[in-house]
Amino acid sequence: MFDLFGLIHLFLFQFLIVLYNYMNCCFCGPVKVLENIEILGSLFNDYRIVIYYDTSSDNTLDILKAYQLQNPKMYFYVNKKVSSPFRTYNLAIARNWCLQYVKQRKDYFPFFVMMDFDDVNCKEVCTNTLSKYLKREDWDALSFNTFPKYYDIWALSIYPYCFSYNHFANSEQHYTIIQNYVTKLLNNLPPNQLQQCISAFNGFSIYRTHLFLDTYYDGRIRLDLIPPKNLEAHKKATKSKLIFKKYITVDGRYEDCEHRAFHIQAFKKSGAKIRISPEILFR
């Protein structure tokens, strides 16, 4: 069996690259997740799985090798050296390695998906929820809601909460406030509408490759990417100044979620439409 927490920490970066006529897609994402990727892959004519794997002490590598024999569409890279003491920096390095794989094949893969190896994506996958969005043009980066609430507040930037909740006072309280805020927005959207945001991932997101060629994942604190008026809006909403402190799982003096810089760059450089679907992909 997969070491779930090892997967979450060490290689969240499974890519499923899919070809369906003119469309490509990338998914990131324990054994059940691999099964779900195969199910999603069945929506398309062809697909590839690309994994960046950090060396661990469990048997994950053996499982990957065995799965590769079963499914030769999977390709993985084994990284034997930890590049940084900061988790988000290492996540960014891994995601950028996978992203480079897509960029080098941009004409073949017009879509890619980033998907986490976690328990959320181990649930039953609703293929119809994804397939109906593939030909819609009202999104360039699309993530999905989760039940009973939207959970990935770390990667989320949505006005007026435009930066990381970890960088303001009462961060635990504001995690819940922001979670309730975005969940309410999604639950009250008109039919067939998507929620506009600045950054969102929620464990799974699909992208149009050509709008993300000039961007990259960055786990550093990138205040230079956030307009001052957006920072002020977040300060006002939380009644707090910016705070830079070390937490148990993240060092807020130096780290931010790697997805935020990725999405903001794409919006600034390419006008990418970052959206959240109110529908649930994994139930």
Image (cartoon, helix red, strand yellow):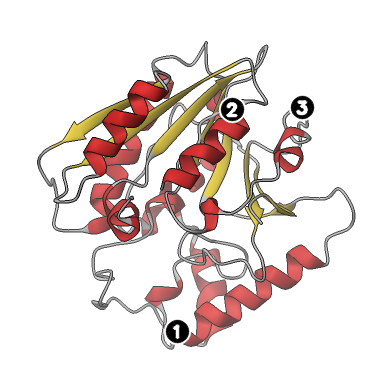
Q: Amino acid at mark 1?
A: Glu
Residue 9 point in image, percent of width and height: 29, 56
Asked if one can make out residue 240 in the rendered structure from this viewpoint, the answer is no
Q: Nearer the viewer, residue 257 or 144?
A: 144
Q: Amino acid at mark 2?
A: Gly
In the structure shown, which secondary structural element does the residue marked by tag 1 occupy? helix
Q: Which residue is mark 1?
A: 172
| Quarter of the C terminus within the rendering | bottom right
Please give the label number shown on residue 41.
2
Q: Earlier in the sequence, mark 2 or mark 1?
A: 2
Residue 36 point in image, percent of width and height: 56, 40
Q: Residues within 10 Å of mark 3 (few under 14, many from 20)?
A: few
What's the distance in space between the residues labelled 3 and 2, CA to CA?
A: 16 Å
Residue 97 point in image, percent of width and height: 30, 31
Please give the label number shown on residue 26.
none
- Confirm or deny contact between disc 3 and disc 2 (CB under 8 A): no
Q: Quadrant of residue 61?
A: top left
Q: Nearer the viewer, residue 186 or 78?
A: 78
Height in image: 280 above or below 22? below
Q: Amino acid at mark 3?
A: Lys
In the structure shown, which secondary structural element does the residue marked by tag 2 occupy? helix
Q: Which residue is mark 3?
A: 135
What's the distance in space between the residues labelled 1 and 3, CA to CA?
A: 39 Å
Q: Residue at x 67, y 71 (%)?
A: 148
Height in image: 227 above or below 32? below
